[in-house]
Amino acid sequence: MSETSKFTEDILAAARAKAQSIIGEAENQTRQASEEAKTVISREVGEIIQNARADAEAVKRREISEARHRSKLQEQKEKSTILSEVLEKTRNRISDMARDQTKYLPYLTNLIETGVRELGDDVALIHLNQADLSRINISNLEKEIGKQLGKECKIEWSKEPIEALGGAIVSSIDGKARIVNTIDQRFDALEPKLLIEAGKSLFGE
Amino acid sequence: MSGIETVKIIVEAEKQAAEIIQEAENKAAQIRKSIDSLIQDQRREMLGTAREEAATIVKRAEQEGRVDAEGFEKESAEKIRELVTRASTRKNTTAERLANIVLEGEK
């Protein structure tokens, strides 16, 4: 091989080596870029899956929470129905008990006496319901009230019946002052307590 | 070989060498260019798969949640039925007790 041939061969060999190096470097760079991209993409994938898992947990929690809420509403509805029925039964029971004069008369006497005391007038007008007006011996009742009051108080009896399960309304003669001592008023006033008692008795609350 | 011929041969060799390098640079540029689209494709594919998997996870959770909720509601309905049955047997005694509270102020 001549000197010239050897020289040109060296030039080409150097060029091929440089070409190889250029391509190798490009391949290395792309390999590195690919690895970096994979890392970034994997992180994005991880985030997507992680968010999905969090969403999934939230979805499950929401389903259970809604079911719990629906059940709670259903339970409250059932309880409310039973409580309403029991309050109605209670009214009926009170109505029955009010027919038993041995128990009812002392109770009524006490309600009227309390009303008269609260009114504080010398004359009181007593209003009863139709059933009591019909069956109760007014003069006996008046005597009992007088005994309990232990003082002079004139009692007058209204002939207009009131709408009530029992008990009485005690009013001043002019009707300006009224003490409502009916069973209905007592029932209404006691309703919060009755509901608590009913809850304990019925549901063990 | 004359001096001029020698120079010509060397110039030709230099020219070839330059072409080889140019070709390599073109190829390197092509490699660099192709990696961008390769990465984009890879990204699109991996994210697409991940989104499908994510949708499956959420869908499965919805189904599991519904099943759990149905189970819970069934169990709860049974408890409510028992509560209603038990309470129903106590209605009369409770009404009696409440009536006594109203009429007698019983504690």
Image (cartoon, coloured by chain):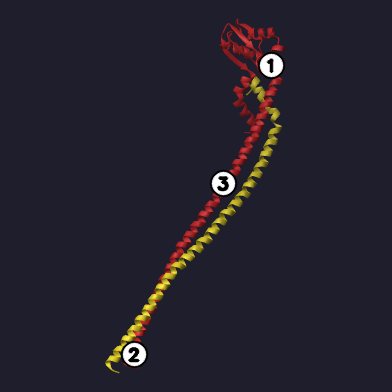
Chain colours: A red, B yellow
Vertical side of A138 occupied by A22: above or below: below
Which of pointers 2 and 3 lies earlier in the amino acid sequence? 2
C-alpha separation, residue under disc 1 versus residue under disc 2: 137 Å
- Which numbered tag is attached to residue A6? 2
- Which numbered tag is attached to residue A15? none
Vertical side of B3 occupied by A135: above or below: above
C-alpha separation, residue under disc 3 versus residue under disc 1: 56 Å
C-alpha separation, residue under disc 2 versus residue under disc 3: 82 Å
The local secondary structure at tag 1 comes to helix
The local secondary structure at tag 2 comes to helix
> Which amino acid is tagged 3?
Arg
Q: Position of residue A132 (x, y in %)?
A: 69, 14
Left or right of residue A39: residue A148: right
Q: Looking at the image, which is closer to me, A181 or A45?
A: A45
Which of pointers 3 and 1 lies earlier in the amino acid sequence? 3
Q: Position of residue B96 (x, y in %)?
A: 69, 25
The residue that label 3 is drawn on is A62
Q: Position of residue A28 (x, y in %)?
A: 41, 72
Q: Residues within 10 Å of mark 2 (few under 14, many from 20)?
A: few
* Residue at 45% over, 67% down: B37
Q: Chain of mark 3?
A: A
Q: Are marks 2 and 3 in contact (CB under 8 Å)?
A: no
